[in-house]
Image (cartoon, grey):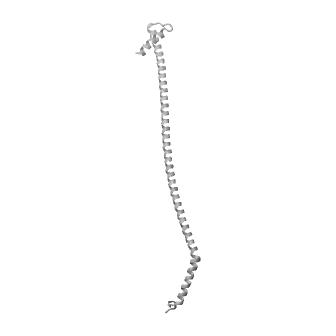
């Protein structure tokens, strides 16, 4: 049988004594520092977990806050766009109203000018008709009327004709 399988009771006793001394020394001097190191490590791990949870919570709050800001910015953008559309529509409406007013003014001016030219043409026509009537009357009567007589007579007839 090999040597490492042989049983020596003295060796077992000394091994147990050595192990007991080693366990007492470790228990007396090493156990407490090991427990403290393990407890410190456990505490640092717990603190790291708590810090990670706090950081995660803060990150979630920041994400939520940023989403609210983005939503608010989108609403403000939509409001600005709507306001811009309203202003553009108002500008277009005002420009259309001004154009319509200018058109009406020009139309009124044109009608006045037409009326003025018509009156002037009627006046010229009356004078021409009066001159023709006076000339024809002179030829028919064979004599000339004096001064304003012929104009007065012709104007009264022309006024009667224009009333009819």
Residue at image point 54% right, 90% down: 10
How many labels, in total?
Answer: 0
- Depth check: 24 or 159 in front? 24
Percent coordinates x, y for residue 12 in the rendering: 53, 87
Task: Name the outermost residue toward the left.
Answer: 164
- Depth check: 43 or 101 in front? 43
Percent coordinates x, y for residue 16 in the rendering: 54, 85
Task: Name the outermost residue toward the right.
Answer: 29
Residue 87 lies, with reference to residue 12, above or below; the image says: above
Q: Quadrant of the C terminus?
A: top left
Residue at image point 56% right, 84% down: 18
Percent coordinates x, y for residue 54 in the rendering: 53, 60
Residue 74 lies, with reference to residue 55, above or below; the image says: above
Residue 24 relative to residue 139: left or right: right
Residue 158 lies, with reference to residue 51, above or below; the image says: above
Residue 49 relative to residue 140: left or right: right
- Depth check: 159 or 64 in front? 64
Task: Name the outermost residue toward the bottom.
Answer: 1
Residue at image point 54% right, 89% down: 11
Percent coordinates x, y for residue 53 in the rendering: 52, 62
């Amino acid at each position: 049988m090999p040597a490492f399988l042989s049983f020596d009771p003295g060796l077992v006793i000394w091994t147990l004594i050595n192990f007991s001394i080693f366990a007492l020394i470790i228990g007396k001097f090493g156990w407490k520092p090991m427990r403290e190191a393990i407890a410190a490590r456990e505490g640092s791990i717990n603190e790291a977990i708590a810090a990670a949870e706090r950081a995660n919570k803060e990150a979630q709050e920041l994400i939520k806050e940023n989403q609210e800001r983005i939503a608010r910015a989108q609403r403000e953008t939509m409001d600005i766009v709507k306001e811009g559309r309203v202003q553009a529509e108002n500008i277009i409406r005002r420009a259309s109203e001004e154009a319509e007013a200018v058109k009406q003014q020009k139309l009124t001016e044109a009608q006045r000018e037409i009326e003025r030219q018509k009156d002037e043409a009627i006046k010229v026509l009356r004078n021409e008709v009066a001159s023709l009537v006076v000339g024809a009357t002179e030829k028919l009567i064979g004599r000339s009327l004096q001064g304003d007589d012929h104009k007065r007579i012709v104007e009264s007839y022309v006024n009667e004709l224009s009333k009819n």
